[in-house]
Image (tube, helix red, strand yellow):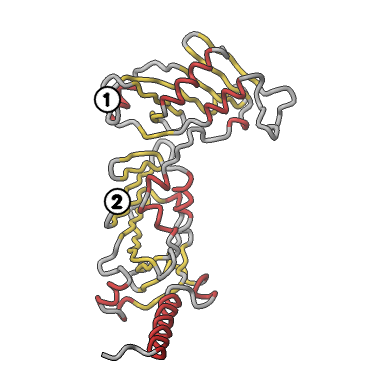
Amino acid sequence: MMGRTKSDIGLYSILLMASLALAWWASIPRNAADAGEVRVASFNPAKVVEINWQGGNSSMSAHRRASDGRFWIAAEKDQFLAGQRFDDALKSFDPLYAKRVIATTDALNDDQLKVYGLKPALGKLTVTFADKTTWTLEAGSPGFGTTDRYAISPDGKKVILIDGEAISGFENPVARFFDRILLSRKSDDADGAELEKGNQRKRFNRATGGAKPSQDGLVFEGPFNEWLEKFERLRAIRYADPATEEKLATREPELVLKLLDGEKVSEEFALKKISGPTSVSDPGQVTWWVFSSKVKAHLEISANRAEPVVKDAESLL
């Protein structure tokens, strides 16, 4: 068999490059009108009461809590309160634009839809509103060389290309929506703070002239400011399961921190400890938890960080 000539190799290379270029072109907007004028969704996030995602490798459901309007997420084995990034994800649908309309669904056969990951769809997002109406978006594979995703429009009539960020969080909710920061506000916004341990209680005020936080973060008087910075570095590991939540509900706190607006408590944290077994600890192992007045649930925190925080607080009281 004769070997390929340089001209043959060159021709194959040109054809390959042309194919790649065509695939790339098909996955991006052709002009500004395609990118900005094809609205495929628009709804008021405040009216959403439930969101469900079902995909090949992931699933999640989110329900709005009646008590405070925040979303509680159940994803595989994890349950947690949604953070700000979940709210941002909802806002991305108000409105959602198609970067490009590929074709009408009736113009494509099953094999062609399969190429876009839409026969069957790789995932389905269902949004339920307070009036019980629903909105769905079927998601397919990524566009060539991008994070954009092919999808079927909610009316089922078009194959479109959308920003992949609109749905990527629902595919990996623990990594994207679990807010591990304990404080819902920065402590330097508070007018004052109180520490309680047993029968001991002490109030801490802003440093003299500290009506506004200084650049180095020295907001409160004395060593309390340094202690508060340690507290702010605590991060949630997981939410308590129902059995652990019940056990913690009657446990007296080792330490209580209150952030104040004037004389009013704006946010409160109660640090507690229990011995195993829990779902992630061995019998006899001590685990530390914090009850947040904003979250209204117990969250596990690192024992290696919690114990020094509680111990250092003793010298402040």
Query: Foreground residue, 56 or 87?
Result: 56
Residue in the picture at 40% in, 46% down: 175
Q: Do tag 2 and tag 1 residues touch (Cβ < 8 Å)?
A: no
The circle on residue 271 is none
Q: Which residue is mark 1?
A: 282
Q: Where does the image place residue 291, in percent across and percent down from the top left?
A: 42, 26
Residue in the picture at 31% in, 59% down: 124
Q: Quadrant of residue 65?
A: top left
Q: Which residue is mark 2?
A: 59
Q: Looking at the image, is mark 2 or mark 1 earlier in the sequence?
A: 2
Query: Foreground residue, 20 or 267?
Result: 20
Work out which residue is located at the far top of the displayed protein and give it: 199
* Amino acid of disc 2: Ser
Q: Secondary structure at mark 1?
A: loop
Q: Where does the image place residue 38, in percent across and percent down from the top left?
A: 47, 71
Work out which residue is located at the far right of the displayed protein and give it: 209
Q: Is residue 154 placed above or below 259 in the rendered structure? A: below
Work out which residue is located at the far front of the displayed protein and give it: 2
Total number of numbered discs in the rendering: 2
Q: Is residue 245 placed above or below 169 in the rendered structure? A: above
* Amino acid of disc 1: Asp
User: Which quarter shows the N terminus?
Assistant: bottom left
Q: Quadrant of residue 180?
A: top left
Query: Foreground residue, 296 or 134?
Result: 296
